[in-house]
Amino acid sequence: MTKSIIISSLLWKLLERGGTQGVQFIVMIILARMLLPEEFGLIVLVSIFITIAGVIAQSGFNTALIQKKKVDEIDFSSVFYLNLFVTIILYVILYISAPYIASFFDHPQLTLVLRILSLTLFFSTFNSIQNAVIARNMQFKKLFVSSLGGVVISGIVGIAMAYANFGIWSLVVQQLTNQLIFTATLWYTVKWKPQLFFSIERLISLFSFGWKLLASALIDTIYSNIRSLLIGKMFSPVMLGFYNRGEQFPSILIGNINGSIQSVIFPALSSQQDNKQRIKEMVRRSIVTSSFIVFPMMIGLAVIAEPLVKIMLTEKWLPAVPFLQIFCAVYALWPLHTANLQAINALGRSDIFLKLEIIKKIIGLGILLIGIPFGVHAMAIGSFVGGIIAVFLNAYPNLTLLNYSVKEQWKDIMPSLLIALTMGAIVFSVQWLRLSEGVTICMQILAGITIYVGLAKAFRLECYIYLILTMKDILKRNKKIPTAEVY
């Protein structure tokens, strides 16, 4: 697992995530202008149950396949058949419970929506092993075509249906089409197909690592979605639509960067699990570099939030602005979460990972209960408070595991944070010129990039120099990057 392979894989993953989420972002903007906030809120409610079922269906085995030093066809096929069996059971449960869920939220149309959208569980099961093979072998280039094709075609279908006044069904069919095309393309490009192998012993071996990740993922998924459930039940789907749209803007941006780094860093760290000093170097590089990229994006987005929403989504979505600004602060912390947690998993300490999830969620639920009486905005602010606490909790075990303390981590990211805050303060003042919203946003973005890069260059930030040298090194290479062997 050389530096060249890691960097090449990261670039392809960034292209895949950036391309697909960029197209998806445009599609969502168009659909948001054509559809109602309530329709988006109802889809969010349905997606919560499907997401939880998806976590159970994967059972932590996919991550275990990536983490395990040596795997073969028996491992892959055994996991595939088990995942498929669990998915069938979960779909039956969702199908039967759909009317009761619809009645609970007092929206009868959710019954058919949930039953049809739950079919995406089968697509996720059929492409799960292909994703594990790709991650193990750093073949992220293959994801690019599959993801981009699915998003583009499904986006066209969704927009056409919205234009034809199909309402909420535009979103349902768009998601189904996306998963169908992605899965079909991935099965064609990744040369793995299930074989007639099944081993209980192999599953037990994988489950010894995976069950803790399953429990952690299940706790995290339920906790992450409990706010949406409460907002949808105690307030309204309309308010949930504003909450969800406000979260989506920073989520898409950070999902692209953080998700790409997470997909690449875990197999890279796992390959070095016997070399803790090397893992520490890689974790530090991940934190410093991703923070340098993420901080200005989130601070800049929070500054231009109101005119951005007016232009892109129209004034009917303005109540989403405060949520957008709050979640910019929440997602700015993600690079710290990701690198620390991936290091813990790569070292095989899923027991620590599970304990951290339980502690964080207990604290988070306490914060949530305090915020509920004060309204939806207080619940969103509670997410940021919980995120700050989680940063320290996630970093604490790596003091012992990697000799990488919380203090050292904050010292590493502080230069990027300070120049990003300086940039944000200067960019915010542009609005006092009282120019049109379009001109203001263009000036703010241009000024933000110029100021941030200028300050990074003036103060010779280590992460800035590293990125420049890395890009120059990549551009100088003319030969093809070698691909790691399968399995």
Image (spheres, helix red, strand yellow):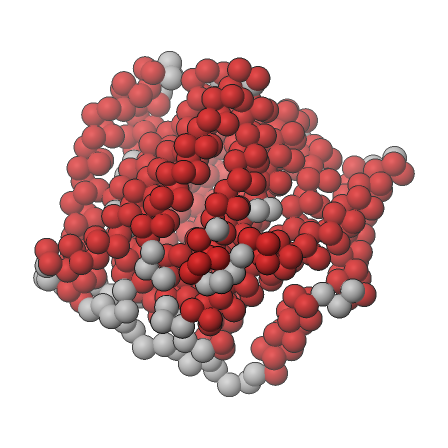
* Residue at the limit of the structure toward the bottom, as seen here: 479
- In the rendered image, residue 127, in percent from the top left (x then y), is placed at 30, 54
Q: Residue at x 75, y 62 (%)?
A: 456
In the picture, the quarter occupied by the N terminus is bottom left
Q: Residue at x 62, y 41 (%)?
A: 328
- In the rendered image, residue 137, in percent from the top left (x then y), is placed at 35, 70
In this view, the residue in front, 337 or 464, is: 337
Task: Inspect this view and state whether residue 442 appears.
Answer: no
Q: Is residue 232 above or below residue 137?
A: above
Q: Quadrant of residue 199?
A: bottom left
In this view, the residue in front, 150 or 122, is: 122
Q: Quadrant of residue 257?
A: bottom right
Along the horizontal axis of the image, is 292 left or right of 2?
A: right
Q: Is residue 200 above or below residue 312?
A: below
In the picture, the quarter occupied by the C terminus is bottom left
- In the rendered image, residue 217, in percent from the top left (x then y), is placed at 35, 43
Q: Is residue 37 above or below residue 80?
A: above
Q: Residue at x 65, y 29 (%)?
A: 322
Task: Inspect this view and state whether residue 417 appears.
Answer: yes
In this view, the residue in front, 302 or 462, is: 462
- In the rendered image, residue 99, in percent from the top left (x then y), is placed at 27, 19
Q: Residue at x 15, y 60 (%)?
A: 202
